[in-house]
Image: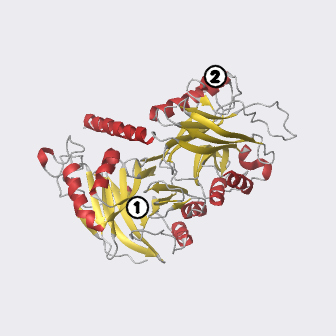
Amino acid sequence: MKRTTKIVLTVLLAVASLQVAKAQESGFSIRVMSMNIKECGRYCGYKSAPYAELINQYQPDVVCLQEVDYRTNRNGGRDWLNEVALATGMWPYFSQSMSYQGGGFGTALLCRYPFWGLTKIISNITGAREPRSTAWLYLTLPEGGVVRVATTHLALESGQITIQHLADVNSKMFKEDSTTPTLLIGDFNSQEGSDPYTYAGNRWVDLGKGYGDTYPTSRPDITYANQRLDYVMASPKTGWSVVKYEILDCPDLSDHRFIVADLIYTPNN
Amino acid sequence: MWPMLLAALATACGPVPDDNGGTNNGGGNNNGGGENGGDYVAPEIPETPVSANLFRVDYFTTLEAEGNYFTMRDAGVASQFISSQEAPRSVAYMFDLCNFTVGQKQPAVQMAYDNKAYSFFLQTGPTKAQTTEGTAMVSRYASSSIVGTTGADGVNISGVTFNVGLSKSATLTFYSARIESVEEVEKAVEHFGVSWQNDGVLIASVLADQKEAISSWLKSNFMGYRVEFAESKGTPYDVMVLCPAMMVCRSIEQMKTINLPYWKVTMEKFF
């Protein structure tokens, strides 16, 4: 019985892969945002409205969020993500990394269109101080084209730990699907040129190279040197065009600058 | 609320005992109907349910051909219904034709917000620039997995997976669809046949005059499943519940809360 099930499963997966491949034949354009929101809005009293206003201003197709609280003590028990979802008309997914302060803490996705597939993973990397989640969704865009978009917040304890975390993410994402055009977006906690950044280049192309640093915002209380920590990475490495790549300095909302990117994917480019 | 008669019309199965008195998938042919060309019949079910293994889904639907469920109805009533429900609570609340309109407040997200729950959207039509057809879902269970189709072959079905606490922890995936032809079922089985033989439960609105043809096709071409239909008089669609043979749909009751029609689907999982 088990053997038969395995055979059927294999055939079904092959059929599904062919269908995904067929759907990929059409290219697409997409606007994505990356937002590390610093302890879910610590700098603005944990309010959701300023973030919703910003998202509404840019009308992205997918928002990849990091440092999202779900009903924690520090944010007054508010369901921040659903508040933003209600204010923007986007569909939310909260990807909890761990329980925190009576609620949850993790990454999140907001999508302008329905998504028909989703996977959440939690990486427990030896030496990392906390578990970290990565979540990805699949959507079929209205003009055609299928894309997978992931939000992540990589571990920061050392370059080696960050690499191990990214290796875990890569392994699980590409084991699931190695053909669908994919964006991995978020806070990599790694500067351009670092070992984790170089490692990322094995599987991903950095679409934001040359567009500027993402950390810190122009807050007077942060004195770190400017650096790039937040990325829009893409796979496959070819076929992507950057129409616009904007770095937003919102010092009242985060210590990280946000990214808005307009991208076009053309297969077999 | 006014519970009405259980309207389960057809099951795909005449009883066939299995050697262990439980259930099985009926032999080695998982996807091809009965062996030697015979129709598939699901194994017999125990007469008395094990209460710890019962679970429930509330399926809110008008069973009409079109229209948004909440156009003429107050999502606040549904939200109140969810919050006032006492144990055992439903695993999921599904809202057929609770279509997704870009940029508009989604009722299911509001319900999730009101009830400290999670919202999901099961796309049942192609992605449109403005409004996409689908079934919204609210659940107190978090999920780490949604599976679905790209829509490339004209079939848009997706399902949300939960780990549900019964007498043992059970992984269950709840799918939704609007089915108008046997051909759609054929394609859907290509995508999800394995799941529907293992952990998947499809709760769908099915065009009433297609029920017999669907039952017949399933009997001849699929195995390891059970299917039940509940008839609604005067509507073009009926309710269809398809699940693995290791589960059974114990009842489908037509209900109403204020002006929200829904179907209470009670199921049992066998271990």
| Disc 1 element | strand
Residue visible at 22% across and 55% down? B217
Q: Would you name the residue on which mark 2 appears?
A: A198
* Mark 2 residue type: Thr
Dot 2: within a 10 Å radius of its alpha carbon, few (fewer than 14), some, or many (20 or more) residues?
some
Q: Chain of mark 2?
A: A
Residue visible at 24% across and 43% down? B30
Tell me the quadrant of the picture where the N terminus of chain A can be found. Answer: top left
Q: Would you name the residue on which mark 1 appears?
A: B56
Q: Is residue B53 left or right of residue A231?
A: left
Residue visible at 70% across and 26% down? A192
| Depth check, front residue: A140 or A185 | A140
| Depth check, front residue: B108 or A158 | B108
Q: Is residue B174 left or right of residue B242?
A: right
Residue visible at 49% across and 44% down? A145
Q: Compared to A128, does A109 lie above or below?
A: below
Q: Is residue A202 left or right of residue B183?
A: right
